[in-house]
Amino acid sequence: MSSTSLIPNSSDTSNNSTFSEQLPQQLFTRRQIIPLCNDLLWRIDRGAVRTLTWSEDGTFVTLGYWGSGDLIGYPLSKVQPYHIECLTSVEVSIVPPHLWHLYINALLSHIQHSEELLSIVHRKPISVRLWQFLVWLSEKFGRNVEQGKLIDLNVTHQEISEVLNTTRVTVTRLLQQFEENGMLLRYKRRIILRLPNKLTRKSS
């Protein structure tokens, strides 16, 4: 399977290259929780995380998915409880408050991606909601391959159901329908979307 390089995320790349050597870095393993600090942000240099909370009955609520170049951290949220879970091995840089102004583009990107996801999880019917979420993931974590666009992130059916406020069974059933209809392919626990050239989330 031939492929191109990863699609770049919206981030302040000039700031990343200028200040990466000056920022202390930390490594985290898959499923590890990144510590919360009231006065620090984390810049993701490699890997993917999700931010989440949960309701009083223990139901998880996913707040966002974040990758290379994104800023994350408790100062960007007033939600409690609030966790940052590593979906892969992750390398992050610590960004102290006196440098936050250098990352305006990344901060704006955080707001934009959050609002995009919020708009998706309220779409109806659930089949449209799921498809648009997959397209959203492909734009953030996707790379072009021969058969379409590979979502280079292993997101479980349960995790998807937590994002979209539905059941794991519903997600599994709809993914099977999408596959039968030729809208996606499976490849080593990954999903390849077969996107028409003119397809956008608005047209779904």
Image (tube, helix red, strand yellow):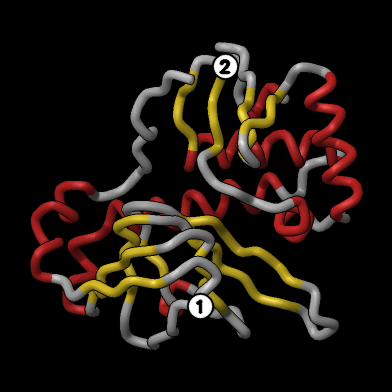
Against 20, residue 56 (above or below) is below
Q: Position of residue 177 (x, y in %)?
A: 86, 28
Q: Position of residue 57 (x, y in %)?
A: 85, 82
Q: Secondary structure at mark 1?
A: loop
Neighbour tally class for label 2: few under 14, some 14-19, many 20 plus, Cα within 10 Å? some
Nearer to the camera, 174 or 14: 174
Q: Position of residue 35 (x, y in %)?
A: 43, 84
Name the residue that disc number 1 marks: 33
Residue drawn at x 61%, y 28% as measured from the top left: 192
Q: Secondary structure at mark 2?
A: loop
Nearer to the camera, 107 or 186: 186
The kind of residue tagged 2 is Gln
Q: Position of residue 38 (x, y in %)?
A: 39, 88
Residue 56: image quadrant is bottom right
Q: Is residue 70 left or right of residue 157?
A: left
Residue drawn at x 46%, y 24% as measured from the top left: 144
Cα distance, mark 1 to mark 2?
Answer: 35 Å
Name the residue that disc number 2 marks: 147
Residue drawn at x 85%, y 36% as measured from the top left: 174
Nearest to N terminus: mark 1 or mark 2: 1
Q: Quadrant of the C terminus?
A: top right
Nearer to the camera, 202 or 5: 5
Nearer to the camera, 148 or 8: 148
Residue 55: image quadrant is bottom right
Residue drawn at x 32%, y 64% as measured from the top left: 91
Q: Is residue 49 left or right of residue 27?
A: right
